[in-house]
Amino acid sequence: MFNVEGKIGGDSMLSPRGVEYARQLPGLIHEHLAGQHLTVWTSTMRRTIQTGQELDYPKLQWKALDELDSGVCDGMTYEEIEEKYPEDFANRDEDKFNYRYRGGESYRDVVLRLEPVIMELERQENILIIGHQAILRCIYAYFLNFKHEDLPYIQIPLHTIIQLTPRAYGCDEKRLKVDI
Ligand code: G3H
């Protein structure tokens, strides 16, 4: 719902499109990943938990998977942030990876807090992460070897499963998208 309203952060519920994706997700997985014993990891935020609620797999909530904390800007639109904190807005544009929101986090902070998640991911197989844009950027960048300065601009489309399979050198990637 916050995406729809152009606001960042928050702990909103899913939009009607998000609800529809959650409804179609078991079918998408059944069609393309049948026979795999998945474990579902979500954040502790309502929108990721709601997205996974139709899935009949073991589930784990990680606080470390919660969206980047935008501090005093939580719940604001980008226009509101630019108006209220013009200097911060410009600084973020200048160095998005290192910019830390007042009272919140930077992408660099998030990369650090995701370390235990990544370590566990490396040990396990067939994990389905239902995540947030900034978080998925960091995880994707780790497996695909993106540079820090490029990481905050990776496109993470909605209503899409990005399947990464580790190989000897890098990862194979497949995308499964639902048109909603
Ligand atoms: O809601 C915020 C997004 O997940 C992160 O977007 O880092 O490109 O502003 P941004």
Image: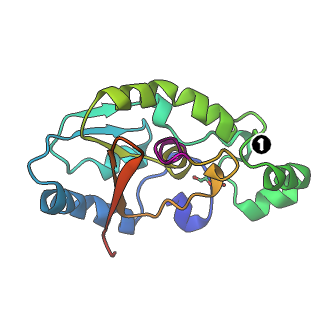
Q: Does the magenta-highlighted stretch encompass residue 161? A: no
What x and y, as percent, mark residue 146? 58, 48
Q: Residue at x 17, y 54 (%)?
A: 33
- Give the extent of the magenta segment: 138-145
Q: Residue at x 89, y 55 (%)?
A: 86
Give the secondary structure at mark 1. loop
Left or right, 114 with respect to 101, comes to left
| Residue 61 drawn above or below residue 91 | above
Prevalent SS, magenta region: helix
In this figure, which residue is indicated by the disc labeled 1? 99
Percent x, y for residue 116?
46, 24
In which quadrant of the rendered image does the C terminus lie? bottom left
Q: Is residue 142 magenta?
A: yes
Q: Residue at x 60, y 35 (%)?
A: 110
Q: Residue furthest right?
A: 87
| Position of residue 158 in the picture relative to residue 141 (left or right) | left
User: Residue at the location (74% across, 49% down)?
Assistant: 96
